[in-house]
Amino acid sequence: MKTTFIQIVLTFAILMASLLSSCNSNALINKDDIITDSLTHYCVFKATGEKVTGRIKFNVPHEGGDSMLCKALLKNGLIKEDKYYLAGQLVAECYYEHPHAINVMSKQEEFDENGKLCQLYEYDEKGRLYQNTSYDGEGNLKEIDIYNYEEAFFLVKKYKDGKQVQEIIYDLEGYPKKGYYFDENGDKIIPAIDKLKEIACETGFYRYYDKDEREFRYVPMVILKMKNITQKPLEGKVILKGIFIQNGEELSTNYTFFQKETDNSLRPELARQANIQSNVSWGGISRNKKNEVKCQIYIDENPYRTIEIKNKVLTSNMIQQ
């Protein structure tokens, strides 16, 4: 419902800008008497060009075939607020409070069937959503989405019982870039990806002998050597994920442990090697084009980087010193 409803409200917020105004704030105005001035963007009367002050009521379509009643308030050609009712119940309120933007929505509130605030949308002066806040039925924070258009990312903060439990950074296309969890005290848990530094990387096609096929086979492999750059031992398990891709087609998704629960914790300033290999193999690699195969690496599900697989043979699964 949220996406559809937002679209409806935004559509009719624009429509409002071509409808409304009068002589006193309590006057009920016929929407057919109003237009939006194409140059100033103020709401004016068709007949006189005078800026509108007053109230207007009209019905707008709603999903499921129902209609909503909209009540809007205008002052000196500016929309101040509009309220939407469904079956007599208030479902949304919109405000237009930008000091330097004419009739651009600044805030939209949505309410659940019990009349409690469940969604809050906030917009910048260009009409772009910059923050979306949702609440549970008890009024506790559920999620906050913050959009940064200049740096091309948005931040999602998730809450449980009013306490933050997770934070995820996405690009504007919706792909996750990095994420964090929070402990019971509300402190951010620093993920392994921020505790490790890549010291060396080798890629190629690892050669092995297939006893069933009685031939040598070649599998794409990434070997990473990473160092603990913190002042504390690396705790817990750390999982590397590799998504192998060839010419835009996913070949396989594979996992390996950088550190198991039973391993000795990697101590500060020490390095460790791990390799990820696909379960798709070749009988030979001479026909492969340069950098035709790639691998997207994740550390504990946090995107790390995409690595091109060199078109060369590896005879060891370790980086040789």
Image (cartoon, helix red, strand yellow):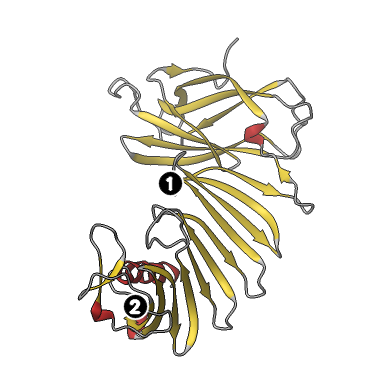
Q: Is residue 28 left or right of residue 130?
A: left
Q: Position of residue 257 (x, y in %)?
A: 63, 36
- Assess disc 2: are there few (<14), some (14-19) or many (≥20) residues with their C-alpha within 10 Å of its C-alpha: many
Decide which of 168, 54 is in the foreground and name it.
Answer: 54
Residue type indicated by callout 2: Ser
Lateral position of residue 23 relative to residue 264, left or right? left
| Dot 1 crowding, Cα within 10 Å, few <14, some 14–19, many 20+ | some
Q: Quadrant of the C terminus?
A: top right
Position of residue 110 measured from the top left corner of the image (x, y, whole percent): 51, 73
Instruction: Tell me the amino acid under the disc marked 1.
Output: Leu
Kindly state the secondary structure of the residue where label 2 is placed: loop
Left or right: residue 217 compared with residue 191: left
* Residue 215 in view of the camera: no
Q: Nearer the viewer, residue 254 or 307?
A: 307
Give SS at disc 1.
loop
Q: Is residue 124 above or below residue 14?
A: above
- Which residue is located at x 54 percent, y 24 percent? 223
- Return the residue at label 2: 22
Residue 149 visible? yes
Tell me the quarter of the picture where residue 38 sits. bottom left
Residue that carries the numbered disc 1 in the rendered image: 172
